[in-house]
Each structure stands twice: as C-alpha cells, then as structure tokens.
C-alpha cells in the first residue's frame, strides 16, 4: 500500500534499503567538484565518484549508496515551467564498481519501489535503450513486467555518455501520474514532454569504454550508476502537483 512518506523519510529508507544489500552509505559530497575540471558544479550522484568508475582510485567498498546534492543547469530553462525540474535537488543513487550488474540493479529498483514504498506496479513503466534486449528480458522475464508496459527509446534518451570513458545504455523508470497531469495529445506516453509520465529513476549500465570517436569496447568489469530524484519520488509518493509542493519545501515556504 502506498503511503505518503516525507522527503527525510524517503532519503533514510533508500539508504537503509541499499545498506541491507551490502552497500556502504556515504555522505553527500560537496556541490563544488574536487579535482574535476570538467564540471563547475556536481550535477549527478555519480559525478564525485568518477575516479572509482575509471579505476583511478580504489573505492572504500564495491557497493556504495549516496544521497547527493546536485545542481543541474542543462535543463534550467524548464525550472518553473514544468512540475518536475529544479535547479538544486538531491539524487539518490546506488553504485557498483565492477561488482553487481543489470540483474541486481533492476530487481532491487523494483523491490524498493513496489515492496518497500508500495507504488502501484501498473503505474510504473520502465524504458530501455532500443537495442538492449538483455535489459528487456530481465524486466519482462525475471521481474514480470508486461511487454505493453515496456518502452524502447533511442540513444538521446537512454544512452548515458559524456565524451570518452565509461558509458552505456540505461533504463529509466516512469510513474504515470494520471491523465489530469497530461497534455491530452493522442501521442502522449512515456517520453512525452508533459508532466503525466514522470521519470523518477535512471539505471545506467556502464558496460562500454568509449574512445569519443564512436568506438565502444565492452568493459571486462561493468559498473552500475543509478540516479533517482528525491524530490520527484516525494512528489509521486505525496501525490502533490509539483516539486515545490513536497513537504520540506512547503515547510520553508509557509
Ligand atoms: N547518473 C544517472 C543520472 O544522473 O541520471
């Protein structure tokens, strides 16, 4: 049964869930990147962990979970216009540095959303990268998602890549907030720009090393990098209209 958890409860529940799966919970890193000239501000849970993904540094454990403070300027134009964009937000993440891979990442995301939080299964829609039949089979055959709840999207939406280095296909989990939040267009569905199908979690399967020129080598030890917007999750759990209406924002505004 879905309950209306607060932002602080959701953060704690997520970190405890992944601790129960063998992860080390680490504190949020500073918003100001350390030894990374490619970023002005930390924009994703994985950003401060890059040296662990590339093997430059040894992680304190091969399974790590964080709730990372983020500022994302790429979609800043959307702030105030959509229900789902913020400048500052917190990103929940679980990470595998050459340890578990797709099977566990997918199964645990489903377990957390449906068993721990009690989200209605029939309102959740996973997307996968077009060619990623492995992820499709895990979702449909192992987790049991009906095929009409699966969506295949292109490289622009479902392939996580920034220049050269570790990259790979991803699988995003969308929650259907209902037609009252939709644009009403006949084409409206997962991936539509409107606020009906809200992307809450992105599971990145970092399985290639890219040379930045279109050549991809399969990594001997692939990684997992996931990111879930804490405020988006709270918006869905609390059944409120937009991210500014979640409990913590409201307590500051009133
Ligand atoms: N690194 C996953 C995400 O930010 O969506």
Image: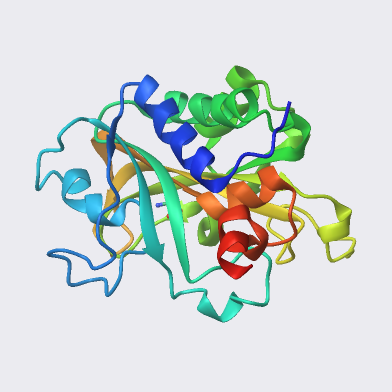
Q: Position of residue 186 (x, y in %)?
A: 90, 61
Does the image show residue 114?
A: yes
Picture residue at 52% right of the left edge, 74% below the top? 75
Picture residue at 46% right of the left edge, 41% below the top? 11
Above or below: residue 7 compared with residue 182 = above
> Is 254 in front, or is 130?
254
Q: Quadrant of the N terminus?
A: top right
Left or right: residue 41 compared with residue 228: left
Above or below: residue 68 compared with residue 75 = above
Does the image show residue 153?
A: no
- Residue furthest toward the front? 254
Q: Quadrant of residue 212?
A: bottom left
Q: Quadrant of residue 55?
A: top left
Picture residue at 62% right of the left edge, 22% below the top? 115
> Is 118 in front, or is 122?
118
Q: Position of residue 14 (x, y in %)?
A: 46, 35
Q: Position of residue 194 (x, y in %)?
A: 74, 65
Q: Position of residue 177 (x, y in %)?
A: 77, 50
């Amino acid at each position: 049964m879905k309950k209306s958890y607060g932002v602080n409860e959701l953060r704690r529940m997520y970190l405890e869930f992944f601790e129960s799966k063998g992860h080390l919970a680490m504190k949020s890193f500073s918003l100001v990147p350390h030894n990374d000239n490619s970023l002005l501000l930390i924009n994703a849970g994985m950003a401060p962990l890059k040296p662990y993904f590339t093997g430059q540094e040894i992680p304190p454990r091969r399974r790590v979970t964080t709730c990372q403070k983020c500022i994302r300027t790429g979609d800043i134009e959307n702030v105030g216009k959509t229900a789902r964009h913020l400048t500052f937000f917190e990103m929940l993440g679980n990470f595998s540095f050459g340890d578990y891979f797709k099977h566990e990442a997918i199964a645990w995301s489903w377990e957390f959303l449906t068993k721990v939080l009690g989200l209605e299964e029939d309102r959740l829609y996973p997307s996968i990268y077009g060619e990623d039949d492995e992820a499709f089979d895990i979702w449909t055959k192992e987790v049991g998602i009906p095929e009409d709840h699966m969506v295949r999207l292109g490289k622009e939406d479902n392939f996580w890549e920034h220049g050269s280095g570790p990259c790979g296909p991803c699988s995003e989990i969308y929650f259907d907030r209902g037609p009252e939040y939709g644009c009403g267009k006949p084409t409206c569905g997962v991936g539509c720009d409107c606020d009906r199908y809200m992307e809450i979690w992105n599971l990145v399967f970092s399985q290639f090393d890219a040379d930045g020129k279109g050549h991809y080598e399969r990594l001997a030890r692939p990684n997992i990098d996931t990111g879930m917007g804490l405020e988006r999750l709270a918006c869905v759990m609390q059944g409120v209209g937009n991210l500014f209406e979640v409990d913590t924002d409201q307590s500051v505004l009133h």
